[in-house]
Amino acid sequence: MPSPLYLAAVVALAGAITLALRAAPFVILSRLRSSDLVAYLGRHLPAGVMLILVVYLLRDLPVDRPLLTLRELVPVLVTIAVHLWRRNALLSMAAGTAVYAVALAVVPA
Amino acid sequence: MTGRSWPGDLRAAAADVAGIGAGMFLLGTSFGLLVVGSGLAWWWAPIFSGVVFAGSMEFLLVALAVAGTALAAVAVTTLLVNGRHVFYGLSFPLHRIPGRLGRAYAVFALIDEAYALATTRPDTVLSGRRILWSQVLLQVCWISGSTLGALTGDTFALRVPALDFVFTALFVVLATEAVVAGREAIGPLLAVAGALVARLVAPDEMLLVAMGLFVAVLLVRYRRTRRESADA
């Protein structure tokens, strides 16, 4: 269980960095707008970062137990499929979560 | 234009955010349930939502905090996950928001949804006050949703294992959107490969190593495209 002090530090740190990122373009607007590197990162960073996070969230997949691995992966694939089909974030998440609920019932740990 | 009075702006903003606000309220509830389900006290939910106010990052912060992640890794992850916000400021109409305090709040509360609302409608329709109100209402939806979820989870000792997946699904959706918008496959493939390498080589510092590898790869690719365009 994390200590309150550590949690407060996590909140303060993440809050400060998020605010700095949101304020940065207004403070150094012109330099950011003309930077090729910023434009390049803006185009190529988001997809990779999000994918890394998905892999991170699935990092403890029990790869030595195929059925349990499938139980975790199938809802992910359903979420992607529904999202590519309807492009509605809430619908995709609801569909994936519903499939996960069924998968938990069908394949107990 | 919907009048110059503030109740008129508030009403207009309420109509603007109705759909998105309901979605944020629901997502907030599952965030609150996650906070309590992760073993944190319920009141951390409104603190996260009030201070950080970046939905997807908050889910991730709870996971990182419960895993006892080093603060340096928390900082780098926040920087990269919320890095996209740097680009919002380039087109958000901050000059139309009234007052210094109003502008300060508008920057603090510049979440994805607020950016989308403020930049997808013509200037003549959206007054600065209406944008500001919509940001306030979105945060009210998010904080009340997460507090309600946390209190419900706390009071009824509610543990819904299937809801753990909401968090994964959120990032799966964000990744799908970003990959489709990026219109290239090599970058995303390199990111996944780097993440798998990091998982095998440095399981305890997986995020930091994976993000570091990916940024390094992007910088190398950037330099190469620059050199190629200079040669051409």
Image: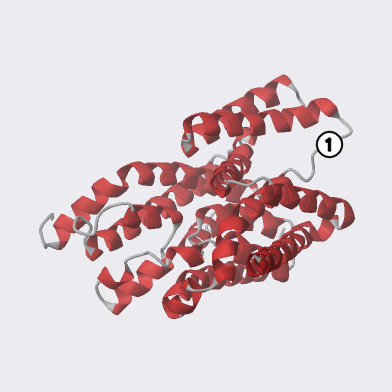
Question: Can you see residue B114?
Answer: yes
Between B156 and B181, the one nearer to me in the picture: B181
Expressed as whole percent of the image width and height from the top left, the position of residue A33 reads 47, 72
Expressed as whole percent of the image width and height from the top left, the position of residue A67 reads 81, 25
Q: Give left or right: position of A80 versus A31.
A: right
Q: Quadrant of the C terminus of chain B?
A: bottom right
In the figure, B99 relative to B216: above or below?
below
User: What is the residue that sits farthest to the top in this orientation?
Assistant: A106
Q: Give left or right: position of B93 versus B230.
A: left
Between A8 and B98, the one nearer to me in the picture: B98
Q: Residue sitting at 55 percent across and 61 percent down?
A: A42
Type of amino acid under label 1: Pro
Residue at which label 1 appears: A62
Expressed as whole percent of the image width and height from the top left, the position of residue A3 reads 69, 66
Q: Residue sitting at 43 percent across and 46 percent down?
A: B24
Mark 1 neighbour class, 10 Å CA radius: few under 14, some 14 to 19, many 20 or more: few
Between A41 and B166, the one nearer to me in the picture: A41
